[in-house]
Image (cartoon, helix red, strand yellow):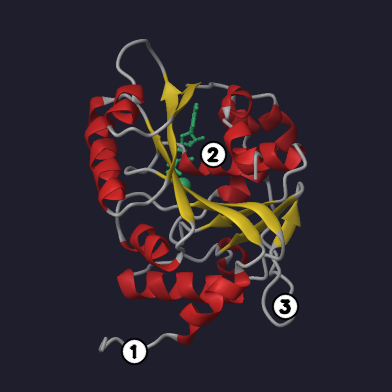
Amino acid sequence: MSRRAIDLREVVIGDRLAGVSRIVGVTGSKGGIGKSVVASTLALKLADRGVGVGLFDLDFTSPSDHVVLGVDRSFPDEEFGIDPHRVHGIDMMSVAFFAGDAPVPMRGDAATSALLELLAITRWGSLDVLVLDMPPGLGDTNLDVIRLLPRLEFLLVGNGSRVVIESVRRALRLFTELDVPMVGVLENMRRRDGDTVAGLATEFSVPFLGSISYDDSLEEALGDVDQLRSTEIYRSLPADQLALA
Ligand SMILES: Nc1ncnc2c1ncn2[C@@H]1O[C@H](COP(=O)(O)OP(=O)(O)O)[C@@H](O)[C@H]1O
Ligand SMILES: [Mg+2]
């Protein structure tokens, strides 16, 4: 018998996600690689195509999806749980809606508890795809979603820089060992010809989802969905792989 106490929140998570067809975590082994931009813009592109999409910002200490999509941080409505905000056709949840500008320092236990709490209370309803914007690295939240969400698939964001490629390989090795299904590997911020993460995708037999170039117009477009729609990032995102829910 397991000596671990049962957390009742774990029991209700399955019910809360029962109407969600696919759960896709946008992850990456490093910070600053574009996970939040990719997760937010992908959710926008899917919503624009009529796909029922949710976006859940799980970077508790540095939430950014509301910045990318230009969303007000008002408190969500409550009724037998918390309703995600409906923004630009996306159902969206973020700790930023609760914390405002306050810093959110968190040790491992607190991050696990925040994840459990939000998964247990959020009413996602019926969705084709729920996109999770993951914090960087192979730490608590990434390991917790693998444990708590048996239907999770990962979309791994990387790039061909030598300071990134090793950590992408490490992440792929771990996800392979843990049997996490992979939507594929996406290269972001490509600046030049040469090595790409495509080789790593082949090495680990996971789909390569293409390359997104470094886009100078992105900074100006953050927070304005009309401008986001005209970026290279929006155009290059592999929405088709996820639209087939
Ligand atoms: N393709 C791109 N071209 C130019 N800038 C990008 C691109 N993708 C992301 N960025 C920028 O890089 C920074 C980090 O992006 P972010 O999505 O916050 O990364 P992460 O979530 O992986 O930490 C942000 O300033 C973002 O605007
Ligand atoms: Mg991020």
Q: What residue type is labelled 1?
A: Ala
Tell us which disc is closer to us: 2 or 1: 1
**Residue drawn at x 29%, y 86% as measured from the top left:** 4
Residue marked by disc 2: 37
Q: Which of 195 and 205 is in front in this view?
A: 205
Residue 238 in view (yes/no): yes
Marks 2 and 3, the one that precedes in the sequence: 2
- Disc 2, SS: helix
Q: Which mark is residue 78?
A: 3
Q: In the rendered structure, are the residues bearing label 3 and label 1 in contact, judged by CB atoms less than 8 Å apart?
A: no
Spatial CA span between label 3 and label 1: 28 Å
Marks 2 and 1, the one that precedes in the sequence: 1
Q: Is residue 43 above or below residue 233?
A: below
Q: Ligand 1 closer than 8 Å to the CB at disc 2? A: yes
For label 2, the crowd category at 10 Å Cα-Cα, with few meaning under 14, some 14 to 19 and many 20 or more, is many
Residue 49 image point, x, y percent: 75, 37
Q: Which of 187 and 66 is in front in this view?
A: 187
Q: Quick one: quadrant of the C terminus?
A: top right
Q: Which of 59 and 17 is in front in this view?
A: 17
Q: In the rendered structure, are the residues bearing label 2 and label 1 in contact, judged by CB atoms less than 8 Å apart?
A: no
Q: In the rendered structure, are the residues bearing label 2 and label 3 in contact, judged by CB atoms less than 8 Å apart?
A: no
Residue marked by disc 1: 5
Q: Is residue 243 above or below residue 89?
A: above
Residue 100 image point, x, y percent: 59, 65
Relative horizontal placement of residue 128, taking residue 212 as reference (left or right): right
Q: In this view, does 160 lie above or below 48?
A: above
Q: Is residue 43 above or below residue 126?
A: above
Q: What residue type is labelled 2?
A: Val
